[in-house]
Amino acid sequence: MTLSDMAACACGLSEAHLTEYKGKQLHQGIIDDYKALDLAAKNAGFDLEIASAYRSFERQSLIWNNKFSGKRPILSATNEPVEIDNLSEIEVIKAIMLYSAMPGASRHHFGTDLDIYAPNMLAEGQSLQLEPWEYNQSGPFYELNLWLEENLLQYGFYRPYKSFQGGVAQEAWHISHIKNSNKMMQVQSEENVIKSLVDSDVLGKELLIENISYLHAQFVTNLCAP
C-alpha cells in the first residue's frame, strides 16, 4: 500500500485496510489480538461487545455537522448540553472536539480503535450510554474497567484517552491497538487532514484548516501513553 493509500485509510476516505468482524469493520492487523483479548475477557466473566469501530469520513462528517449546526447536542465534561448560541465558531469547534473528532482526524478512521462494553454487566432493562459514570465505581462496567486496566497491554491494546489531558475527554471505553494505530497516526498528519477537508461539506472547515496546528496538537496527538 502506498503512502497516499495509507493516508486515505487514516483519514477515513478508504476502506482498503479493513475486514469484517462480528458485523463491524476492523483493521486487518488487529483481528488476532482482539480475538485473544475477547477470549480472555470472556474467561474473566465479561462478554465483550464492540459499540463502535471503524467510522468513515462521511459518517464522522454527519456527526460533526449535526453538532455544529445544533441538530445534535454537544456535551460538556459533566455530560450537560452546551449552549452554543453565545459561543464563537472556534469555541463551538473546541466544545465538539471534547468528545467528537474533526472529520479526517478521528482515530475511528483507523479501524484500530474500538469502543467496547460488556452487555452482560448491564442490569435488566438498562441500556448502554457510553458515559463516564458507567465505568466508575458505581457504574455497571466498573469491574470491566479494572480488568482492562490490568490486561489490555498484554494483548497489544491501550487506552489513548485514559485520563483527561486538556484535549479529548476521558473515555474508559475507547481502546486502541498500539502497533497498528501508531502506523496510521504517522500518515494522519496535519497536511493529510487538510487535504481531506478541502473539498468536503464539513461545517466550519475553513476555521478547522486555519487552526489545524493547535487543534491537531490539542485534540489529535495529545494522547495518554500506553
Image (cartoon, helix red, strand yellow):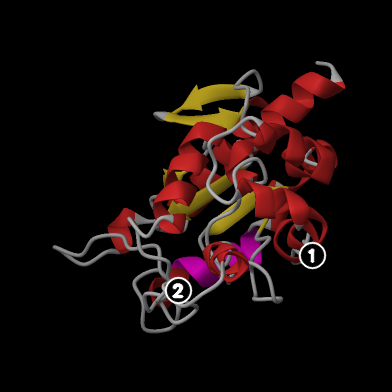
Q: Is residue 126 above or below residue 142?
A: above
Taking the image as shown, residue 21 lies to the left or right of residue 177, namely left
- Tell me the residue that label 1 is attached to: 225
Determine whether the residue tagged by mark 1 lies in a helix, strand or loop.
loop
Number of marks: 2
Asked whether residue 23 appears in the rendered view, the answer is yes
**Between residues 202 and 76, which one lies in front from this camera angle?**
202
Residue drawn where x is 68% and y is 60% of the image: 160
Circle 2 packing at 10 Å, graded few (<14), some (14-19), many (20+), is: some
Q: Is residue 27 above or below residue 87?
A: above
- Tell me the residue that label 2 is attached to: 132
Q: Position of residue 69 (x, y in %)?
A: 41, 55
Q: Read off the magenta span.
A: 144-151
Taking the image as shown, residue 63 lies to the left or right of residue 152, namely left
Residue drawn where x is 53% and y is 36% of the image: 201
Q: Quadrant of residue 91?
A: bottom right
Q: Position of residue 4 (x, y in %)?
A: 81, 22
Taking the image as shown, residue 187 lies to the left or right of residue 63, namely right
Q: Is residue 184 above or below residue 136?
A: above
Q: Label 1 amino acid?
A: Ala
Residue drawn where x is 50% and y is 29% of the image: 25
Q: Residue furthest left?
A: 125
